[in-house]
C-alpha cells in the first residue's frame, strides 16, 4: 500500500506540475472562484483525513466500532497475550494503536465523590464489626497464591473415562480444607485475566467487552493500582512481596505490571537474576511444578518476615505432545476419542498426576516450616484439548470450572480449617473472591474492600465474563452468575439486594481503574 501510494503521489505531481488541478494560493486565497473552491477542497481533505485517522485510532480497540470491524475484515488478528507477537503478526503501528486508547468501563450515572465516600463509610462499618470478633492479622501470615497452569479435574469432563484417578491427593485434600470449583472466564487460555482478578479482586464482567486483557490494555495506563500483595508491602516494605514464573517476563507485559503492583522481584527465565529452578520433565519444554515450588521454598528460607508470594506455573501449559516417557494414562484412559485428541488428553492427564504429587510434597515441606503459611491454589482454566466435549454447548459451564483449595500449614492458627459450604455461601467461587475467602478461612481482620467482597460473594457466589474462544481472548463474552448450587442465574432473576451490590461493585471498580480514585484517600483498602 505504501509503494502504490508513493507511485500515485509521484504521478499526480508529474501530471499537476504547475497547473494546479486543484487550485490553491497562499497569498491570495480569494483571488477567484476556482481558487476559493480549491482552497476549500484541500482544507476539507485535511480535516477529513485527520478525523478519519483520529476516529480509527480512538475506536480500534472498541468492540463493534467501525474501525475495529474494518481492521478485522482486513485481516487484523489481535494477540493480546503477547505484545511482541501482536506487533510481528499485525504490524507495530496497529499493535501500538490497539493499546493506546482502550475502552475500560462506562462511567456509572451515580458516580461522584460523595457516592464513593458513602460507600467507603458503609463498608468500613461492616469491616469494623467483623474485626471485633477477629484478633489475627492477615499479614502475620505468609500468603502463597499459586496459579496452577491449566489444572483441573479430568474426571469432571463429559465423556472422559479413566480407570485410575490422576489426582487422588488433591481430591483427598479438598475434602479436609476450604475448597471447591472456580468459575473461570477462559477456556484453553487467558491466564493473565484470571491472575489479574485474583490479585485485585476486580471482576472482568464489569469491564466493557473491549477490555479483554487488563494486563496489556489497562494496567500500563494506570497511575494507581491496588493489589492484595501491597498489604504485605505496607507492613514489611519492598520485600513484602515477590513473584515467580518459570517462563518469559514479557508475556502479558507482566514485567511492567508487576512493578506497578509492587512486587520487589519478578523471577523468570530472562529476569536478572533469572529464576533458579526451571528444569522440565522428560521431553517437556516447560519447568516442572516441583521445580517451580522449589523456588518458593527457597524464598521462604531466605526471608525473615511473612511475605506475599505469587507463583504462576508452566508445567501443564499447552500444547501437549506426548512428552512423558512413562505415561500410564495411555492405558488408563478408555475414552473413545480421535487419535490426535487422545494423545493430547493423555499427556495432559499425566501432567495433572505429576502436579498432584508435586503439590502434596510441597505442602508437606510447608508443614515443616515453623511460621504460619496459607496457600491459595487454583487452576486458571481447562486446557484447550477437549475438542469433543467442548463441541457441545451444554458443557459450556462445566468446561469453564476449575479446582481450587485454600490450605494452612501446621504452624498456622487456621491449620485444619474447612469453611462450612453453607456458612461460606457455597463451594463455588470466581477468582476475584479468593482473598476474601482466605480472610474468612484464616479468621483474620479485613479491610472495607475485603468486607465488601465477602458481602458480594454471600449474595452472588460466582460471577464471570466468559470468553468463548480457545485462546481466552474473544469478542464473544457473555456474563454468567452462579447461585450457591452452581446453577446459572440470569441478570433478570437477581434480587434487589444483589443488584445493589453489583452497582456498588461497578462504582468501586470504576473509581479505582479509570475514575478519580476517590477511595484511595478513604483507607478503603487498609486493615484497621
Image: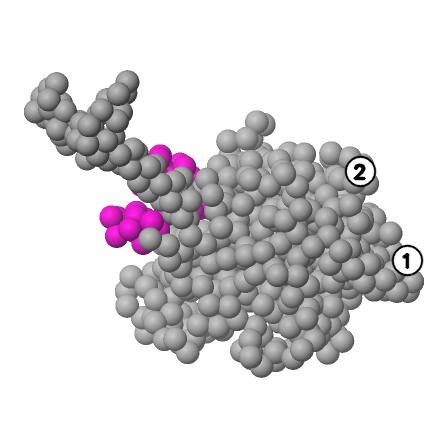
Left or right of 262 in this view: 491: left
Which residue is at a point 83% across and 48% down the rendered structure image?
A: 140
Count of numbered labels shown in the rendering = 2
Q: Quadrant of residue 41?
A: top left
Kindly report the distance in space between the C-alpha atoms of the residues bearing marks 2 and 1: 19 Å
Q: Nearer the viewer, residue 130 or 309?
A: 130
Relative to 306, 363 lies left or right? left
Residue 106 quadrant: bottom right
Q: Main secondary structure of the magenta part?
A: helix
Label disc, if present, on residue 236 of the rendered structure: 2
Determine which residue is flagged by label 1.
135
Is residue 185 toward the left or the right of residue 508 in the image? left
Out of 232 and 409, give the one closest to the viewer. 232
Q: Residue at x 35, y 51 (%)?
A: 68
Element class at badge 2: helix
Q: Are marks 2 and 1 in contact (CB under 8 Å)?
A: no
**Residue at 55% of width from left, 40% of height from top?**
221
Q: Position of residue 182 (x, y in %)?
A: 58, 66
On whether residue 85 falls in the magenta region, the answer is: yes
Mark 1: few/some/many CA within 10 Å (<14, 14-19, 20+) = few
**Residue at point 37%, 58% (across, down):** 64
Nearer-N-terminus badge (2/1): 1
- Measured as percent of width and height from the top left, residue 132 is found at 92, 62
Span colored in magenta: 67-96
Amino acid at each position: 500500500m505504501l509503494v502504490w501510494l508513493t507511485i500515485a503521489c509521484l504521478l499526480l505531481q508529474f501530471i499537476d506540475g504547475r497547473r494546479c488541478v486543484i487550485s490553491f494560493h497562499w497569498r491570495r486565497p480569494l483571488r477567484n472562484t476556482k481558487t476559493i473552491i480549491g482552497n476549500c477542497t484541500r482544507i476539507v481533505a485535511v480535516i477529513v483525513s485527520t478525523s478519519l485517522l483520529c476516529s480509527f485510532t480512538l475506536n480500534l480497540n472498541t468492540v463493534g466500532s467501525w474501525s475495529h470491524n474494518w481492521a478485522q475484515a482486513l485481516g487484523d488478528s489481535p494477540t493480546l497475550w503477547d505484545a511482541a507477537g501482536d506487533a510481528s503478526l499485525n504490524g507495530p503501528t496497529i499493535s501500538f494503536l490497539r493499546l493506546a486508547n482502550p475502552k475500560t468501563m462506562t462511567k456509572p450515572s451515580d458516580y461522584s465523590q460523595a457516592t464513593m465516600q458513602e460507600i467507603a463509610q458503609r463498608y468500613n462499618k461492616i469491616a469494623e464489626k467483623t474485626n471485633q470478633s477477629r484478633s489475627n492479622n492477615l499479614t502475620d501470615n505468609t500468603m502463597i497464591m499459586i496459579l496452577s497452569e491449566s489444572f483441573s479435574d479430568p474426571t469432571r469432563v463429559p465423556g472422559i473415562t479413566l480407570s485410575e484417578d490422576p489426582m487422588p491427593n488433591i481430591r483427598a485434600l479438598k475434602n479436609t480444607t476450604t475448597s471447591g470449583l472456580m468459575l473461570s472466564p477462559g477456556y484453553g487460555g487467558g491466564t493473565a485475566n484470571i491472575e489479574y482478578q485474583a490479585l485485585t479482586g476486580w471482576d472482568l464482567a464489569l469491564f466493557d467487552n473491549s477490555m479483554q486483557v487488563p494486563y496489556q490494555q489497562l494496567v500500563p495506563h494506570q497511575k494507581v493500582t491496588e493489589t492484595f500483595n501491597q498489604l504485605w508491602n505496607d507492613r514489611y516494605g519492598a520485600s513484602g512481596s515477590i513473584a515467580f514464573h518459570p517462563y518469559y517476563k514479557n508475556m502479558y507485559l507482566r514485567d511492567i505490571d508487576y512493578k506497578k503492583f509492587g512486587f520487589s522481584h519478578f523471577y523468570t527465565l530472562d529476569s536478572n537474576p533469572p529464576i533458579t529452578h526451571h528444569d522440565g520433565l522428560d521431553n517437556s519444554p516447560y519447568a516442572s511444578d516441583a521445580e517451580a515450588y522449589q523456588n518458593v521454598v527457597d524464598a521462604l528460607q531466605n526471608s525473615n518476615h511473612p511475605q506475599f508470594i505469587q507463583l504462576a506455573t508452566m508445567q501443564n501449559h499447552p500444547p501437549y505432545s506426548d512428552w512423558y516417557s512413562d505415561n500410564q494414562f495411555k492405558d488408563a484412559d478408555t475414552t473413545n476419542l480421535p487419535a490426535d485428541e487422545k494423545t493430547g488428553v493423555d499427556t495432559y492427564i499425566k501432567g495433572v498426576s505429576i502436579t498432584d504429587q508435586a503439590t502434596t510434597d510441597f505442602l508437606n515441606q510447608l508443614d515443616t516450616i515453623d511460621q504460619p503459611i496459607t496457600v491459595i491454589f487454583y487452576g486458571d482454566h481447562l486446557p484447550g484439548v477437549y475438542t469433543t466435549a467442548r463441541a457441545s454447548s451444554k458443557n459450556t459451564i462445566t468446561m469453564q470450572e476449575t479446582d481450587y483449595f485454600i490450605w494452612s500449614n501446621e504452624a498456622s492458627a487456621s491449620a485444619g480449617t474447612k469453611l462450612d459450604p453453607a456458612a461460606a455461601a457455597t463451594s463455588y467461587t470466581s477468582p476475584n473472591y479468593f482473598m476474601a475467602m482466605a480472610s474468612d478461612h484464616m479468621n483474620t481482620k479485613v479491610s472495607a474492600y475485603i468486607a465488601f467482597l465477602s458481602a458480594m460473594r454471600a449474595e452472588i457466589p460466582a460471577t464471570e465474563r466468559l470468553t468463548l474462544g480457545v485462546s481466552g481472548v474473544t469478542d464473544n463474552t457473555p456474563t454468567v452468575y452462579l447461585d450457591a448450587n452452581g446453577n446459572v442465574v440470569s441478570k433478570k432473576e437477581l434480587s434487589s439486594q444483589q443488584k445493589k451490590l453489583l452497582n456498588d461493585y461497578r462504582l468501586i471498580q470504576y473509581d479505582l481503574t479509570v475514575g478519580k480514585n476517590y477511595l484511595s484517600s478513604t483507607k478503603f483498602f487498609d486493615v484497621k
